[in-house]
Amino acid sequence: MKKRILTGDRPTGKLHLGHYVGSVANRVKLQHKYETFILIADVQALTTNFEHPENLTQYVRDVAIDNLACGLDPEAATICVQSMIPEIAELTVYFSMFTSVASLKRNPTIKAEAKQYGYGENIMYGFLGYPVSQAADITSFRANLVPVGEDQVPVLEQTREIVRKFNSLYEPVLIEPKALVSKVSRLVGTDGAAKMSKSIGNVIELADLPEVLEQKVMKMFTDPGKIYKGDKGHPDKCPVYSYQVAFSTESELDQGMIGRRLESLPDSESGGELKQIRESCLSGKLGCVECKKNLAGTLNRFLSPIRERRKDFEKKQKDVDEILIEGTKKARIETKKTVQLVRNAMKIEYFRG
């Protein structure tokens, strides 16, 4: 039998390039090799959007469309909606009974995001318990592998701790998942100060139109040590160059994306592109404005097929909804099995003869 992958997204709007390098690229690449479940975590989206739940209807659809536009095949991967799977909520409650508040407060991901949102001592119960909810997501599907960005590794490690604790307390019925971290596991935001985040407003969305993308790229922060065009640059300290590394024609991300293969590119685009950019920056021959224009062109070429596929799916909203409905039905078959295993292990199946 194929091993199983569980991954997903919080629907807080359209997906961005950070989502793509952190997880989407891997899920598209592996969907035919593994049994794949993609969870749209709408309940977890409320941890930071609880004041406007009415936005979730569109956000859920946006996330589904972005995944499909990136090449996710609904015949190969099951896309489902978290709030429509009550078994996840049940497992969240069980896990919360033996997960300490101290361990949640120590979680590096929770600490960083709580600081980002300025919660301090007023942190919400649901936000603090996010790793418990995520553990329920992963274990309910009995996933072996979870593609994540580097920043989410501590949350997955807490899932592994919860699984070990459950299996030692009761019976070893839950699978301890492993993380699959993308080689380009974190993409700095356009401000150069943090990872891409919608709340900060430093993102490039997969759906951004060419002119919008170009405007965002031209405003990007660059090498702080390169003031004038002729100054020698430090590409390893430049956010623009980190995008070149991730999305150049030599990048693994690019070669794996919707058929745009390196071997199909004209000679002028292939071979040594990244090396030329780096050397020209180091020598001072390449100015920041020119480099940004180059990057905008690279990103627009990369995103062009995604945009076209997105337009097609936007015209087929009923089909997208049906994919989510059927995917959620299929998902519940598996989550019900897991909850039954958990109840039996905990000896709380009261009325079965």
Image: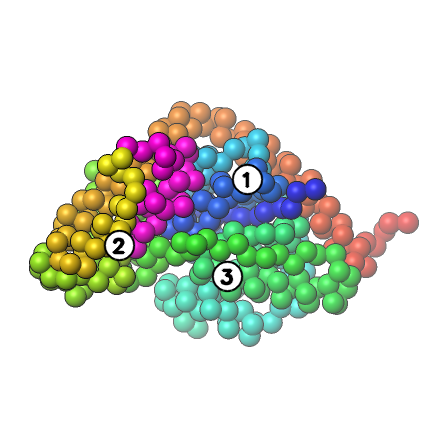
Q: Whole-Å distance between the Cαs marked 3 and 1?
A: 21 Å
Q: Which residues are magenta?
A: 242-266
Instruction: Name the front one of labels 2 and 3.
Output: 2
State the residue position of label 2: 241
Q: Residue at x 48, y 26 (%)?
A: 318
Q: Which quadrant of the view contains residue 227?
A: bottom left
- Describe the element under mark 1 as helix, strand or loop: loop
Q: Residue at x 28, y 32 (%)?
A: 266
Amino acid at the residue labelled 3: Val
Instruction: Name the front one of labels 3 and 1.
Output: 1
State the residue position of label 3: 153
Amino acid at the residue labelled 2: Tyr
Q: Residue at x 12, y 54 (%)?
A: 285
State the residue position of label 1: 31
Q: Earlier in the sequence, mark 2 or mark 3?
A: 3
- Which residue extends farthest bottom? 102
